Amino acid sequence: MTFLIAHQTQPTMNTCFSTCLAMIKAEPAGCVIDQIHDWYFGGGVSTREALDRLQIPFKSFDTADLPYFQNDGAYLVGVPSLNMPGGMHQIVVECFEGSVTVLDPAAGVQGWKYYVASLTGCAGQVKLYGYVVDAFVSREYLEERYAFKLSARESA
């Protein structure tokens, strides 16, 4: 077993949130963007409401509790934007058996900076330090959504 989530690149400057949810749901970013982007980005909609609308089961966090990446699954994480000064950005941190990977939808956009768990020397990388955990999605849900990927590994 290993990490499950497939990285997707956000198609526009302001579709990071929808793209992160698409990664968690194992659906194309365009589909999730069509379902929630205008509604969510229009304002007045919480992360909870978006996750509920997409039927993603989750655990929310009180940021005063300083949650850590300790359980296997996916963390929906808010970070300062590296590409839009003064803005916020959404990433996914996937944990499995004590290892962590960062899935930043800004990765893959020409000239953009993006967050990583550890630097490998590629241009644009920034090590993740400061963040706020918005929600946690269990490994069990990811296994259901990525069952096709697990089946292919077992067949090989």
Image (cartoon, rainbow, N blue to C red):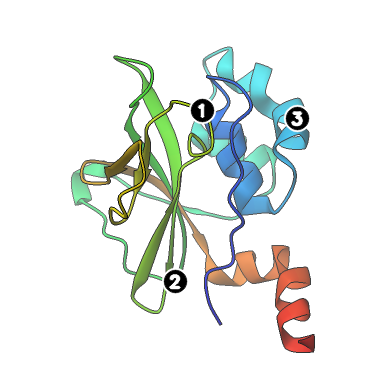
Pair 3/1: label in front: 1
Which residue is disc 1 drawn over?
110
Dot label at residue 35 = 3
Give whichever of discs 3 and 2 has the lower sequence position.
3
Q: Tell me how far mark 3 sits from mark 1, CA to CA.
A: 26 Å
Q: Is residue 156 above or below residue 92?
A: below
Which residue is disc 2 drawn over?
72
- Residue kind at label 1, given as amino acid type: Gln
Q: Tell me if mark 3 has few (under 14), some (14-19) or many (20+) residues whose alpha carbon lies within 10 angstroms of its own.
A: some
Q: Tell me if mark 2 has few (under 14), some (14-19) or many (20+) residues whose alpha carbon lies within 10 angstroms of its own.
A: many
Q: Nearer the viewer, residue 26 or 154?
A: 154
Q: Could you say whether the residue bearing mark 3 is in a helix, strand or loop? A: helix
Give whichever of discs 3 and 1 has the lower sequence position.
3
Q: Residue at x 28, y 56 (%)?
A: 118
Q: Could you say whether the residue bearing mark 2 is in a helix, strand or loop? A: loop
Estimate the x, y position of residue 85 in percent, counting from the top left.
31, 14
Q: Residue at x 78, y 70 (%)?
A: 148
Q: Nearer the viewer, residue 124 or 10?
A: 124
Q: Could you say whether the residue bearing mark 1 is in a helix, strand or loop? A: loop
Estimate the x, y position of residue 104 in percent, counting from the top left.
46, 42
